[in-house]
Image (spheres, grey):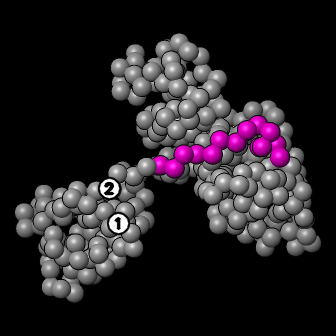
Amino acid sequence: MLIDGAYRYIELRRSFGFKLRKTSAHLASFAEYAASVGDVHVRNNTALAWAAATSSTQDSYYRRLQELALFARFLRAEDAGHEVPQHHLFYRPRSRPAPYIFSTEEVARMLTAARELRATRLNPLKPHTYEMLFGLIAATGLRISEALKLRLDDVLADGVLHIRATKFNKNRLVPLHPSVMAKLDAYLDVRQRYGGLESRLFLTECGQPLPNSTARHVFHGVLRRAGIATDRPRRPRLHDLRHTFATRVLEQCAAGREEVARDFVALSTYLGHGHIKHTYWYLGATPELMGDIAAAAEMLALGRCA
């Protein structure tokens, strides 16, 4: 049955570090759909019908067919009766939205607005939590998911954060600037008094791990309070703090080719990028980072830089 093949495929890819939470659910859904129409092999027409029935956008339609194509190739290695869905016919180029790069003054206003959030009897930690969360992302470039997963024992004694099970299922160490560590130590003092037994670093008013959706909602409220980008049709995202960090670091790169290569590798590692090309994207997204540094970084991304 296709569901058995799906389980084997997911287990194999997870052994290589892939999480595949959505893919696992999608393949189970397809296996059930295929069984309902009497298919015991992956069929192109069945795949197209399933993707059309379960997709809300052209992008999700393509991605689901792409997942099925990879799965079908896995099965086809053992049984040539499986057909590989023609997913490439539905590919549409995607453009990443240009990030909003916060100025130093805007970051300061944002943190002030977070610090001025009203503490309540139920949530005395609220202003401390959001000032620390937003400040930490701005100062380290962490992904919001990484920051929210932090536990108390991930703050190591030597001023280093232990980031576990990241986007690419890897762990990494993120050194903190002494000024950031001092802020974090002050937060931990308050957190210890009000945080209860929960081990997560950032908590809700109920003492539970802080959800991503709540953090984003408060972030947009803080931006309004701070008067940041209020006239823009597209609001800055919390993830743009990560983009801002990367941009400011790259602006300080030396112009020499060897120095750029060194700085790019260091930044890519610090940010936890799976490939240096994702770090290189910041140059194209931010006009002020063009010129010699872009040329040197392009050579590095193409593997030409020693």
145 w.r.t. 108: above or below? below
Circles 2 and 1: CB atoms closer than 8 Å: yes
226 w.r.t. 7: above or below? above
The x and y percentages for residue 175 are 68, 34
Instruction: Give the residues in magenta.
Output: 96-109
The x and y percentages for residue 75 are 17, 63
Question: Which residue in the structure is indicated by mark 1?
Answer: 58
Is 88 on the left-hand or right-hand side of 269? left
User: Residue at left 18%, top 61%?
Assistant: 86
The x and y percentages for residue 73 are 18, 58
- Looking at marks 2 and 1 on the same chain, the residue that comes earlier in the sequence is marked by 1
Q: Please tell me in which quadrant of the rendered image residue 208 appears.
A: bottom right
The x and y percentages for residue 65 are 27, 65
101 w.r.t. 192: above or below? above
The amino acid pointed to by label 1 is: Gln
Is 304 on the left-hand or right-hand side of 155? left
Q: How far apart are marks 2 and 1 (CA)?
A: 8 Å
Nearest the eye: 217 or 121: 217
User: Residue at left 23%, top 77%?
Assistant: 49
Position of the N terminus by quadrant: bottom left
The amino acid pointed to by label 2 is: Arg
Nearest the eye: 228 or 250: 228
Determine crowd level at label 2: few under 14, some 14-19, many 20+ residues with C-alpha closer than 10 A: few
Question: Which residue in the structure is indicated by mark 2?
Answer: 92
Position of the C terminus by quadrant: top left
Q: Please tell me in which quadrant of the rendered image residue 24 appears.
A: bottom left
